[in-house]
Amino acid sequence: MNTLELTGLIGLGSLLAGFLGALTGLGGGVVIVPMLTLLFGVDIRYAIGAALVSVIATSSGAAAAYVRDGYSNIRVGMFLEIATTIGALCGAALALHLRVSSIAIIFGVTLLYSAYASYRQKPHPVENGAPDRIATWLNMDSAFPSENGLETYHVRRVPLGFLIMYVAGLLSGLLGIGSGAVKVLAMDQAMKLPFKVSTTTSNFMIGVTAAASAGIYLSRGYIDPGLAMPVMLGVLTGSLLGARVLAGAKVKTLRIVFSAVIGVLAIEMIYNGFAGKF
Amino acid sequence: MSESVARAPGASDAADAQATNLQMDKRIDMFMGMLLRTGVLVAATLVLVGGVVFLARHRVPVTNYRVFQGEPAELRTLGGIFRDAFAWHGRGLIQLGLLLLIATPVARVTFSVGAFFYERDWKYVAVSLLVLALLFCSLFGGHG
C-alpha cells in the first residue's frame, strides 16, 4: 500500500465517521481514534492529534447552522468555557505523561458512556423552578423558541455544571474528542437547561475546548500533517453531508446501530489497553 | 430582523430587556457563525492544496504511523510552519491550514469580547477575556 492509497482509505473512513456522527448526533470524533488505532495501526498519540483537529472543524463548520434557530445560550457557553479550557489544558498536559495503554482504557470507558448516554437521552420538560442566585448574578437566564412561542427558563446549579464541564474539558484534552455527551450531561441534567439549548450550546463550546488542547498537541508534535489531512477533510465533508440529510432521515435505528458499533470499539480499546497492545 | 418576539401582554420591563438581549445575542451568533464558516473553508482549502502537493511528491515509502516519533521543529512551531508553508512544502501548507483552523475558535472568543463590550456587559467581558487568556496559554505556552 502506498501513501496515496493509505490517505484515500483513511479519508473514506473519516468521511463515513463524520457522516454517521452528524446523523446520530454523537459526533465524528469519537470513532476516529478507535478507527485509526484498531484498523490502521496508528499510534494513539497521532490518532488523538488528528481527531482533535477534526473536532474543531465540525464544531466551527456547523456553528452557522446551529445558531440560526436561536437555541444556544452564549452566556452559559462562555462562562462554562472557563472550566472546559482549564480542563483541556490539564488533559493535554496529562496526555504527555500518562502511559498509552492507560489512555486507551480511559478512552474505552468514555466511549461506553457516550454510547449509553445517547441511547438514554430524551428531552425533559422545562422545569421552571425559582431563579438561582448565581445564575441570576451571571445573567444566565434566557428564553428559547418552543411550540408555544418564546419560553423562558432558569439556569440552576452553576457550580455543579462548572465542575462537570471541567471533567468534559479534561477528557477532551486527554482523548482528542469533543466530549459532547459529558457537556450535555452538565447542562441538561445538572443545570436544567432545555434539551435543545444544551445540545446546541455544547456544539458551540466544543470548538473552543478542542482549540485549547490542540495548541499543546501541535507544539508537542502530536499533529502529523499527512495523517490529519485526510481525517480533517473526511470528517468535515461527512458531517456537512450528514447535517444536510438529517432533516428527513429516520435516525432512531441508525443511532442504535451506531451506538452498538461504538460499544464494540470501546470494549476492544479497553481489552487492547489491558493486553498492552498499544 | 423579520420575526416578532411573542410575549404575553403586560410583560414586565425585565422580559423586554431579555427579548432585546436575545435579539442582540442572535445577531452576534449569526455573524460569528459566518466568520467561523469562512475560517473553516479557507483552512480546509489550504489543507487540501497542501495535501495535493504532499501526495504528488511523497508517493513512496509509506509513512509509518505505528511508531510515534513526534513532528520535527519546522512542523510544530509558528515560525517553522510559516517558513515551511511559504517554501511551498505540502506538509507545511497542511500545518498552516490546521493552525488557521485552531485559530477559528480563538477568533470567536475574541469577537465575543468585543460584542460583550458593545453591550456593556462587563462581567462577560471579563469572562471571555479569561477564556481568551487560557487559549493563548495553550498556543504559546506549550513549549517546555
Image (cartoon, rainbow, N blue to C red):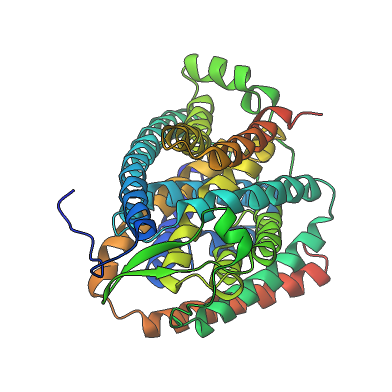
Observer-nearest residue: B80 or B144? B144
Image location of residue A153, percent across then percent down: 44, 69
- In the rendered structure, the answer to whether residue B22 lies left or right of residue A260 reads left
Q: Quadrant of residue B124?
A: top right
Observer-nearest residue: B108 or A262? B108
In the rendered image of this protein, does residue A78 appear above or below residue B8? above
Tally the marks.
0
Q: Quadrant of residue B72?
A: top right
Q: Residue at x 73, y 29 (%)?
A: B141
Residue positioned most to the left: B2
Q: Residue at x 58, y 22 (%)?
A: B81
Q: Look at the image and tell me whether residue B5 can be seen.
A: yes
In the rendered image of this protein, does residue A217 appear above or below residue A30? above
Image location of residue A159, percent across then percent down: 69, 62
Observer-nearest residue: A269 or A193? A193
Q: Look at the image and tell me whether residue B66 can be seen.
A: no
Q: Quadrant of the C terminus of chain B?
A: top right
In the rendered image of this protein, does residue B28 appear above or below residue A84? above
Image location of residue B12, percent across then percent down: 34, 62
Observer-nearest residue: A36 or A96? A96
